[in-house]
Amino acid sequence: MTFYIKQNDTSPAIRATLRDGDGDVINLDGATVRFHMRPIGSTTVKVDAAGTVIAPAGGIVQYSWSEEDTDTVGAYQAEFEVTYTGGNVETFPNDGYIRVEITDDIT
């Protein structure tokens, strides 16, 4: 999945349906979620912030951008980290990353 957003934009939010290795939707009832993003090829994190569980039974999560999240043009790797009610942590996607492309705006 590649998500595109223009530099300095805060909309649209990035949204994902989280699935396990078999393709089944993850039940997020009682879970919390964080969104992480870093430039491709870097270990420096650009975003580490709370996300929102939109539909717990449907596995839908999202992250709403702040201005500093999208101020730098480039290609990024992103993921959603879920903490379940029992304290276990799982990261999605677990077989790679969500690619985020921030493209420059004209003005």
Image (cartoon, helix red, strand yellow):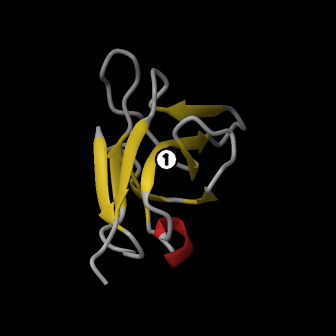
Residue at which label 1 appears:
29
Relative horizontal placement of residue 53, taking residue 55 as reference (left or right): right
Q: Position of residue 38 (x, y in %)?
A: 57, 47
Relative horizontal placement of residue 7, taking residue 40 as reference (left or right): left
Toward the front, the furthest residue is 106
**Are there few (<14), some (14-19), or many (20+) residues within 10 Å of tag 1?**
some
Q: Nearer the viewer, residue 34 or 41?
A: 41
Q: Position of residue 33 (x, y in %)?
A: 56, 51
Q: Quadrant of residue 87 in the image? A: top right
Toward the right, the furthest residue is 87
Q: Residue at x 31, y 62 (%)?
A: 5
Q: Quadrant of residue 81 in the image? A: top right
Relative horizontal placement of residue 50, taking residue 76 as reference (left or right): right
Q: Residue at x 63, y 39 (%)?
A: 42
- Count the numbered circles shown: 1
Toward the top, the furthest residue is 22
Amino acid found under the numbered disc labelled 1: Asp
Q: Position of residue 56 (x, y in %)?
A: 41, 49
Instruction: State the quadrant of the C terminus.
Output: bottom left
Q: Nearer the viewer, residue 49 or 84?
A: 49
Q: Residue at x 30, y 74 (%)?
A: 105
Instruction: State the quadrant of the N terminus.
Output: top left
Above or below, comparing residue 70 to residue 91 in the picture: below
- Judged from the image, the secondary structure of the residue bearing numbered disc 1 is loop
Query: Do we see residue 50 in this rendering?
Result: yes
Q: Position of residue 31 (x, y in %)?
A: 57, 47
Relative horizontal placement of residue 56, taking residue 47 as reference (left or right): left
Q: Residue at x 52, y 39 (%)?
A: 40
Query: Do we see residue 60 in this rendering?
Result: no
